[in-house]
Amino acid sequence: MFTGIVTDIGVIRAVDNGRFRISCGYDAQSIDIGASIACDGCCLTVTRVEAEAPGRAAFHIDASNETLACTTLGRWGESTRINLERSLRLGDEMGGHLVTGHVDGVAEIASITPDGDSKRFEIVCPESLARFVAAKGSVALDGTSLTVNFVQGNRFTVNIIPHTLVVTTWGDKAVGDQLNMEVDLIARYAERLFSPAKNENSE
């Protein structure tokens, strides 16, 4: 489980048939084999850890063909920068919202507009996910917990403040970039509970 508060920017150092080596600013001794790390919002399991320098590490992860096809991971290459978040521990501050790291679909940046010192991003999401997006609700995009400002059909906007533009990869984003999208966990279960006709287990 995660909160959508990015704690580091990782850099892809090697790609080999669904296996990735990711350089980060975490201490190697703090990363356990089998630990879960959200990489651009996708919960992935650490398979190997190497110390690169004091206070820096590289960790390895494997991605299945399903993950490569249903997320942006299949587009990662060497030098790609990604948002990282360590898994939530009991007692940690809940700074964002509950994020599972299970990507629901891929969204796309339709426009970027300056808004004071911030930037307003218009996002186009899959039609199947639009019903889970609500104004003033939460959404995770590339592992970042964001508040939805405006919704129309399958388009919505989010505002990114200067701090977030610096400490995440949002400062690198351009129109047409694709994003890993995870809808709000509460919205997902509410839709399931109140739509019994869509529940295969309902009687």
Image: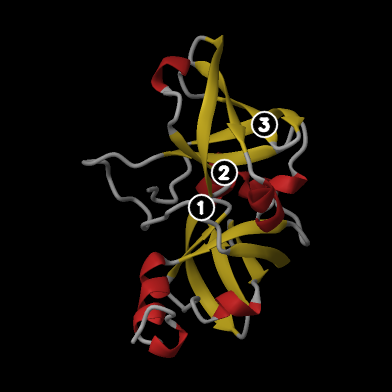
Residue denoted by label 1: 144
Please identify, in this view, whether the residue under mark 1 or under mark 3 is nearer the observer.
3
Separation of residues labelled 1 and 2 (CA atoms): 8 Å
Place residue 196 in its image quadrant.
bottom left
Q: How many marks?
A: 3
Separation of residues labelled 3 and 2 (CA atoms): 20 Å
Q: Which mark is residue 20?
A: 3
Query: What sort of colour scheme is used for the picture?
Result: secondary structure
Residue 201, how many percent across, how many down?
Answer: 38, 78
Q: Which residue of the protein is positioned furthest toward the bottom in this rendering?
A: 197
Q: Is residue 63 left or right of residue 134?
A: right
Q: Which comes before the other along the chain, label 1 or label 3?
A: 3
- Residue 113 appears in view: no
Q: Is residue 200 above or below residue 51?
A: below
Q: Closest to the observer: 149 or 123?
A: 123
Which residue sits at x=36%, y=78%? 190
- The quarter of the rendered structure image containing the C terminus is bottom left
Q: Is residue 10 above or below residue 152?
A: above
Q: Which comes before the other along the chain, label 3 or label 2?
A: 3
Query: CB of mark 1 within 8 Å of CB of mark 3?
Result: no
Residue denoted by label 2: 168
**Amino acid type, label 1:** Thr
